[in-house]
Structure formats: C-alpha cells, structure tokens
C-alpha cells in the first residue's frame, strides 16, 4: 500500500522542506567558514550539501508518485524551509548550528518513519529511503561532532 493519507502527505512534504533547508544551510556555511582550518571546513560542508542532492530528489519523486506534482509546489515548501532556517538563525557558531539542524532532521526522520509505519502506509522503498537518509545523516552528525571536538567545544 502506498502512502495516500493527507497526514502522511503533510509529513512527507514537511520532511522534503527540512531536507531542502538543511541542504541550503550547509551550502551557505560552505561559503562562510573562515579561520583555521577553513579549507577543511569548506570541504566538510561541501560534502554535506552535495550528498543531500539525491536524497532531496528521491523524496520529491516519491511524493510526486504518491500525491501528484502539486504536492511539491515550491512556495509552500519554501515557507516551511524558511521557518526551519529562521529557528536556527541566531546560532552563530556554524558547526553547532549544523549539528543542531542535523539533530532536528534525525528527529523528524524518526517521527515520519513511525507515523508511516503506524498508519500501515509504509512501502518497502520508502522504509529503505528513510533508513538510508537517517544513516547518512548520522555520519554527518559524527563529522560535525568531531569538528567541534577538534575546536575544543
């Protein structure tokens, strides 16, 4: 059974917005890092945002297949992403902000996973997708924690 409920549509489109916002944040931070070792940090954030492109595309394609093209309309998605980014805009340390965003994303992945599973609308492909994204972002959390540890934070 494919996801068809309005609640699951909302959860999946919100997740898409969070992924897009996280991608945007990491890409922007990639340009903004400075100090020592800025080049290594530049590459770290490049790795983070580049690895997310396929995640975003994969989820958007799943949403379109379940709910239609209108489900991924730009304006509502951007509004959710904007609110998410605004919530972390006061965190000045780019590494702490990135780790906080990644932690929020992990929590969102868990909520979406649990809700889809509980509704009986989890497909094998969607299960695999969510698990793979969660796994990749656990690695991102590890890398950010290591960077913060190296900075003595």
Image (cartoon, helix red, strand yellow):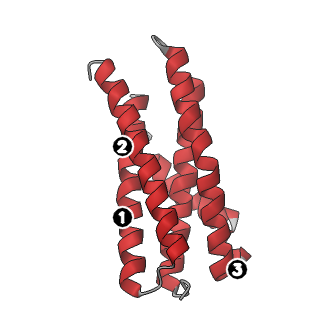
Q: In the rendered view, does 39 fall on the left or right side of 153? A: right
Mark 1 — residue? 110
Of badges 3 and 1, the one in the foreground is: 1
Q: Residues within 10 Å of mark 3 (few under 14, many from 20)?
A: few
Residue 90 appears in the figure: no
Measured from the top left, where is residue 152 in percent x and y? 26, 18
Marks 3 & 1, CB-CB < 8 Å contact? no
Of badges 1 and 2, the one in the foreground is: 1
Kindly indicate the quadrant of the structure image that contains residue 58. bottom right
Q: Which mark is residue 100?
A: 2
Mark 3 — residue? 68
Q: Residues within 10 Å of mark 2 (few under 14, many from 20)?
A: some
* 3D distance between C-alphas at marks 3 and 1: 24 Å
Q: Earlier in the sequence, mark 3 or mark 1?
A: 3
Kindly indicate the quadrant of the structure image that contains residue 120. bottom left
Q: Which mark is residue 73?
A: none
């Amino acid at each position: 059974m494919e996801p068809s409920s309005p609640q699951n549509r909302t959860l999946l489109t919100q997740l898409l917005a969070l992924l897009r916002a996280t991608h945007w944040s990491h890409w922007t931070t990639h340009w903004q890092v400075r100090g020592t070792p800025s080049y290594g940090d530049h590459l770290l954030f490049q790795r983070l945002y580049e690895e997310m492109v396929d995640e975003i595309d994969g989820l958007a394609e799943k949403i379109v297949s379940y709910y239609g093209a209108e489900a991924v309309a730009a304006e509502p998605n951007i509004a959710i992403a904007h609110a998410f980014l605004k919530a972390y805009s006061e965190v000045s340390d780019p590494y702490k902000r990135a780790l906080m965003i990644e932690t929020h994303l992990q929590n969102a992945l868990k909520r979406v996973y649990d809700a889809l599973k509980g509704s009986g609308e989890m497909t094998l492909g969607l299960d695999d997708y969510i698990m793979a994204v969660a796994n990749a972002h656990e690695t991102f959390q590890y890398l950010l924690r290591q960077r913060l540890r190296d900075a003595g934070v």
